[in-house]
Amino acid sequence: MPLICIASPKGGVGKTSIAANLAHALARTGRQVLAMDLDPQNALRLHFGIPLEDGAGFLAALPQRPDWREAARHVAPGLRLLPHGMVDLHQALALDAALERDPELLATPLASMLAEPGLLVIADLPPGPSRALAALVPQAALVLVALLADGGSVAQLPALRSGRFLGNGTLGSLLAARLRVVVNEVEAASHLACEVARAMADTLGQRLIGAIARDPAMAEALACQTLLAEYAPGCRAAEDIATIARILDRALPAPVATAPAPPTLAALWGANWSAAP
Ligand SMILES: Nc1ncnc2c1ncn2[C@@H]1O[C@H](COP(=O)(O)OP(=O)(O)OP(=O)(O)O)[C@@H](O)[C@H]1O
Ligand SMILES: [Mg+2]
């Protein structure tokens, strides 16, 4: 049911890596998760081993009104993926125009995803403002913003604190309450990183929910087209992502309990199984 948007005013800050690995970490807590790629770069699939030449996807096919359940790939236990699909420049612009003309193209399947009991949707957004971000934010339980521990990220803090990144005026300030921030690629030994983290904590307070270490395993896992917890379980960044997943898990409604499996005959008869008629 809940939707988490992974977004940022900045590009190249780890949104897609965080979306993929958080989706995996949350599925490992027992949730049913749908990871949805809304970025025409179509990169989320690469974390799940989908071959480069496999260009099929959901968002790219929206004008044909695809069934999201049929487009979803099972990529790990409890985890389905909706790749964006491969698009060229003109297709990306045409898709944007189609979404502007008919916002229901995305709103209708999104409503169906959010109506599925117990399903957690994690959406990977393109950098900066986008039509997809504007369409999803009103439905989002949380917008998780990724930043780096650098001066450029500090410059974005006023727009995040006021909610301007998500909208204007009253709408922006209402939506700002759903905003959470993680700072990525942190080097604990760096004086700059410590100062930036302090500035972020001062400005954002409780909205700053975690930090992820700069860890070569993150880039290596992507190069191997696999998830961090499978490539380097227990590495520093994997632990940081697991911690953030636990924080989000606690902030979200509890997963829907699945019906217990009916007892087997052996369990019913217990030790007398062999003597049963
Ligand atoms: N914690 C980290 N430590 C080291 N490298 C990282 C870390 N997080 C992400 N990276 C690397 O940084 C690069 C950019 O990451 P990613 O593609 O996830 O960013 P993005 O914000 O989604 O980019 P874009 O704005 O283009 O969509 C990738 O090579 C990724 O492997
Ligand atoms: Mg990305």
Image (spheres, rainbow, N blue to C red):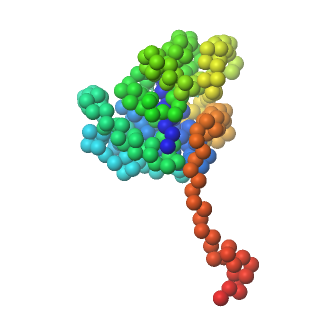
Viewer-proximal residue among 160 and 91: 160
Dividing the picture into quadrants, the one containing residue 273 is bottom right
Residue 265: where, in percent of width, then height?
Answer: 63, 77
| Quadrant in the rendering for residue 260 | bottom right
Residue at the outermost front position: 170
270 to 105, vertically: above or below:
below
The residue under the point 37% across, 51% down is 70
Q: Is residue 88 above or below residue 35?
A: above
Q: Which residue is pictured at 58% across the width and 41% down the height?
A: 253
Q: Quadrant of the C terminus?
A: bottom right
Tell me which corner region of the image, top left, top right, bottom left or bottom right, holds residue 276.
Answer: bottom right
Residue 22 point in image, percent of width and height? 56, 37
Residue drawn at x 52%, y 48% is: 118
In the image, residue 133 above or below residue 192: below
- Viewed as shown, does residue 277 lie left or right of 62? right
Q: Is residue 99 visible?
A: yes
Please state the total of marks drawn on the protein image.
0
**Picture coordinates of residue 246 (x, y %)?**
64, 38
* Foreground pick, 35 / 52: 35
Q: Residue furthest right?
A: 271
Point 45% across, 21% down: residue: 171
Residue 146 seen in this snapshot: no
Q: Position of residue 21 (x, y in %)?
A: 55, 38
